[in-house]
Image (cartoon, helix red, strand yellow):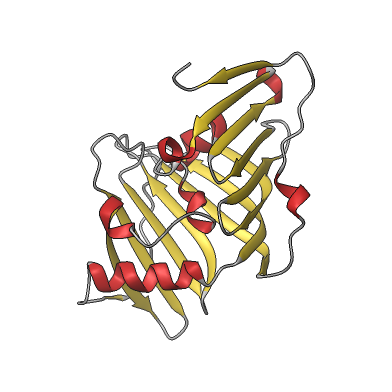
């Protein structure tokens, strides 16, 4: 999301080392199962560590931050210094504030859904199969994993892997066409706890450049 997030989320390449069995009921059944899980998230709050690994397996970036998501359509993302960025969605648009660049970029939500997969936590998920090819597999007794492959050739990532432990989203892994991997690991997860509406506003100083997509 923003520059570091969108670049990070558009990268991946680590394989899961723990063996699991592939769900034979792929496609619509996996998409429906994932949609059901995500729709059960009325709100999701967590801290995160994001690690980006290049095609050679070398770590090229590590960032930390926090996110808040609330249905329908509310989303807040913050990464800490030295790569500070703020991303907010009100359900119709996504605003990205880069303090170092003194710049705010405003996107239509429909244009950002595939390049900002974390918006799955607050956005519409009933039509997942229209946007992604979805497969699922079980790992042990408590871990469920879903892999989403975008159907659009213009997507910024080639695959997105969501890992749930006892129904709680623990990790997102995203791979791009350059074999870069971005791993988002979530901690201090608060599921379906109240979130104030004011948490989904973006404050930035006067005088910053505001760029609107399509303007």
Residue projecting furthest to the left: 24
Q: Nearer the viewer, residue 118 or 141?
A: 118
Q: Residue 158, can we see it?
A: yes
In the displayed structure, does residue 162 sit left or right of residue 51? left
20 in relation to 27, above or below: below
**Vertical relation: 107 (above or below) 185:** above
Image quadrant in which you'd find residue 179? top left
Residue drawn at (71%, 69%), measured in percent from left and top? 193
Q: Nearer the viewer, residue 204 or 173?
A: 204
Q: Residue at coordinates 65% horizontally, 46% vertically from top-left?
A: 76
Is 19 positioned to the left or the right of 199 in the image? Answer: left
Residue 43 versus residue 21 in the image, above or below: above
Residue 59 seen anywhere in this rendered image of the structure: no
On screen, residue 86 above or below 24: above
Q: Quadrant of residue 17?
A: bottom left
Residue at the spot 65% in from the left edge and 28% down from the top edge: 97
Image spot of residue 64 (x, y percent): 67, 45
Quick check: 101 left or right of 203? Answer: left
Residue 86, percent from left and from top = 67, 36
């Amino acid at each position: 999301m923003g520059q570091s997030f969108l670049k990070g989320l558009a990268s991946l390449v680590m394989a899961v080392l723990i063996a699991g069995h592939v769900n034979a009921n792929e496609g619509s059944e996996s998409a429906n199962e994932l949609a059901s899980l995500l729709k059960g998230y009325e709100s999701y709050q967590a801290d995160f560590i994001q690690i980006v690994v290049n095609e050679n397996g070398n770590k090229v970036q590590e960032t930390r931050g926090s996110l808040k998501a609330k249905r329908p359509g509310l989303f807040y993302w913050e990464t800490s210094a030295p790569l500070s960025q703020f991303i907010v969605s009100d359900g119709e648009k996504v605003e990205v504030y880069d303090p170092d660049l003194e710049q705010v970029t405003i996107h239509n939500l429909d244009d950002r859904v595939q390049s900002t997969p974390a918006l799955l936590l607050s956005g519409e998920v009933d039509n997942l199969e229209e946007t992604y090819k979805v497969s699922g597999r079980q790992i042990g007794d408590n871990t469920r994993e879903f892999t989403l492959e975008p159907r659009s050739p213009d997507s910024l990532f080639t695959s997105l892997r969501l890992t749930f432990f006892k129904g709680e989203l623990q990790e997102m892994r995203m791979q791009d066409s350059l074999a870069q991997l971005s791993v988002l690991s979530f901690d201090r997860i608060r599921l379906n706890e109240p979130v104030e509406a004011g948490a989904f506003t973006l404050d930035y100083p006067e005088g910053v450049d505001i760029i609107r997509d399509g303007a």
